[in-house]
């Protein structure tokens, strides 16, 4: 698989960052070109419309989630532990793509909402064989959601606990026991 041109990725990175920092309404073509340090013509060369930028972001997300699902399925510690540990955000590419896509979904983009539902289904498909039933799977997914949410708000107005180190180890072990018992 060939890598996309650097300028194209720079534009997509800028669009993603504006979405994360300022929301969907601020992520205009002009703002994206300015943030990427390219001319409007340079932006239009790679992305002719805002919709094409959004589609590229969703494709980036799908690619990153596929990699994540593959890593989860092969994780030596098991999929549940991997999933919960990676639910504590690290500001890595998948975290940024999820946050940016969430901003699009919050702005009413149904394609972004569907993409977010699909990635949850992809993760659940890997986790399900490692849980005793649907309720146990819900437990794993909801703990992940809480970790992600609290971490996302850690600089915001309602920060919650984000366990790390031994506390995260204990939480993972507790959830694994409950999900498998």
Image (cartoon, rainbow, N blue to C red):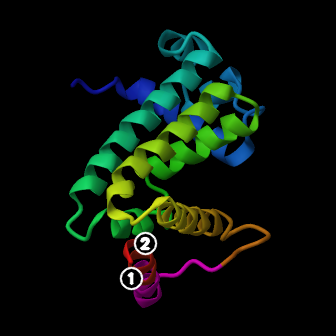
**Which disc, if any, is residue 173?**
1
Residue 171 is covered by the magenta coloring: yes
Residue at screen point 50% across, 46% down: 120
Residue at screen point 49% across, 24% down: 56
- Quadrant showing the C terminus: bottom left
Residue 154 location (% of width, % of height): 66, 71
Residue 22 is covered by the magenta coloring: no
Front in this rendered view, residue 64 or 118: 118
Q: CA distance from mark 2 to mark 1?
A: 10 Å
Predominant secondary structure, magenta span: helix
Question: Badge 1, how many Cα within 10 Å: few under 14, some, many 20+?
Answer: some
Q: Quadrant of the rendered structure where residue 103 is?
A: top right
Question: Callout 2: helix, strand or loop?
Answer: helix
Q: Quadrant of the rendered structure where residue 107 is?
A: top right
Nearest to the eye among marks 2 and 1: give it. 2
Which portion, as a residue range, is magenta?
Answer: 161-172
Q: For mark 2, what is the residue?
A: 179
Residue 61 location (% of width, % of height): 46, 37
- Quadrant showing the N terminus: top left
């Amino acid at each position: 698989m060939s890598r996309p041109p650097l300028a194209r990725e720079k534009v997509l990175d800028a669009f993603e960052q504006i979405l994360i920092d300022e929301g969907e309404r601020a992520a205009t073509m002009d703002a994206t070109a300015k943030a990427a340090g390219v001319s409007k013509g340079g932006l239009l060369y790679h992305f002719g419309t805002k919709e094409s930028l959004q589609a590229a972001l969703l494709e980036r997300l799908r690619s990153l989630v596929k990699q994540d699902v593959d890593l989860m399925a092969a994780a030596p510690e098991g999929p549940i532990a991997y999933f919960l540990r990676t639910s504590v955000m690290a500001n890595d590419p998948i975290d940024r793509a999820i946050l940016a896509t969430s901003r699009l979904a919050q702005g009413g983009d149904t394609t972004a909402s569907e993409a977010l539902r699909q990635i949850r289904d992809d993760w659940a498909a890997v986790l399900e064989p490692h849980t005793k039933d649907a309720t146990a799977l819900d437990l794993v997914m909801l703990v992940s959601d809480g970790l992600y949410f609290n971490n996302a708000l850690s600089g915001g107005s309602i920060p919650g606990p984000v366990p790390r180190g031994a506390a995260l180890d204990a939480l993972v072990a507790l959830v694994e026991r409950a999900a498998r018992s």
